[in-house]
Amino acid sequence: MKATKKIVSAALILGFLLPLPIAAWAQQKSVPSAESIDETDTTAQQPGEPPAVRSLKKAKNVIIIIGDGMGTAQVYASVVAQKNASNFLRFPFSGFSRTYSNNKYTTDSGAGGTAIVTGHKTDNYHIGVLSDGTPIPSFLTLLRNQGLATGFVVTSSVLDATPASTYAHVPHRKMYDTISLHMSQCGFDVMIGGGLSNFRPENRKDGLAPLDTLRQRGYDITYSLEEMKNSKSNKLVTFFCENYYGPVAPGRDPVLTEGTKKALDILSQNPKGFAMMIEGSQIDWGCHNNDAPYMEAELADFEKMLKVVLDFAEKDGNTLVVVTADHETGGLVLTDGDIEKGKNTCKYVTDWHSGVMVPVFAFGPGAETFSGIQQNSDLMPKVFRAMGRKVEN
């Protein structure tokens, strides 16, 4: 009898241990893309997905939020600064994203943003294209084609790498004149940020006027917070500045929270649902400067926007919210702090990006599937599964 028990125990142990190297190898070698998934199977359990908590409800709306340069240390710095009242603590599910690009261990925002919004890794500096230049659509473009309302709000130029990855298809992120043409023709309902200069013909080598194209397509174009708030149009473009905003600390208008509120007001009117991308762009800039007060001010601004989004999602009940980063910036280390006083002691090890994993937070229908370690290119296909929708290029 004892011998039999030992044999059974050994078999059980082997049964648990043997699949582990295979699973680890499969995860390392396979980089899922939108085309590699059977999108018609929206109820099947996915690898690593806990069956007991798998959501049966499908998300009607989706909001992907990107904290540019926001690694785990930046998130915890915000949790501490908020004295444990951080909105990050409201997310019931969290995981990690592996950010390396197709050709570099450390990604840039072009490849990082493209992977998040299209479901495909690409080379650094590419925007909305594969490494061979093949254009690939973002979740905003795909869902717009399926009848949903779409838009984005950023605290940088609308032509910067992250917002551009939602609508443009160029081999280099600094092709601003071409990117602005792509934006003027993308058909999103709401686009809010900076970067007006490249839309004016006098500032372009080709003499074209993407601003006129936007007007001809029926957009209400506004240039201030007050104009944006007062707009009655369901097609809105807001340029808050010619090129780039200043930091929030010296007194930048609350464009992130107010832009988010305005976008939600417009997009939520669509009975089919909506898709939205929001970027806290200047977390990255503060970390590039190794400037902790700059970074913390941008994170505090990000927290206010998160409250707006999560309050909406809680009330709505049909909205999936996914928060992540395109990469970490600065190699931030928190060497000391005081949670009661909301103080962090910060140290940076680089003025560039690092290659570490970044956090993923999820709330709403399908949120549980974003737990665990995943590729940045896994996020967009998971969004479509959570919505019960096909990826139709």
Image (cartoon, rainbow, N blue to C red):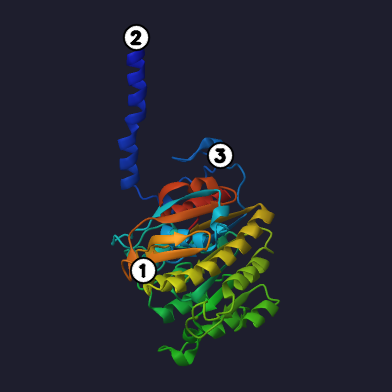
Report how far apart the C-alphas of labels 2 and 1 lie in the structure. 63 Å
Check disc 2 and report the residue beneath it: 2
Q: Nearer the viewer, mark 2 or mark 1?
A: 2
Q: Are marks 2 and 1 in contact (CB under 8 Å)?
A: no
Q: Residue at x 33, y 69 (%)?
A: 352
Q: Residue furthest top?
A: 1
Instruction: Say whether residue 385 is visible.
Output: yes
Q: Secondary structure at mark 3?
A: helix
Which amino acid is tagged 1? His
Please tell me which of labels 2 and 1 falls first in the chain.
Answer: 2
Residue drawn where x is 35% and y is 38% of the image: 23
- Reading the image, the residue beneath label 3 is 53
Residue 381 point in image, percent of width and height = 47, 52
Q: Give how far apart the Cα atoms at labels 1 and 3 are.
A: 37 Å
What residue is disc 1 on? 126
User: Which x, y percent locates residue 79?
Assistant: 51, 59
> Which dot, 2 or 3, sits closer to the camera?
2
Q: Amino acid at mark 3?
A: Val
Check the image and name the residue furthest to the bottom: 202
Comes first in the chain, label 2 or label 3: 2
**Which of the 4 image quadrants contains residue 304?**
bottom right
At label 3, counting other C-alpha atoms closer than 10 Å, the crowd grade (few under 14, some 14-19, many 20 or more) is few
Out of 35 and 197, give the one closest to the viewer. 197
* Mark in front: 1 vs 3: 3
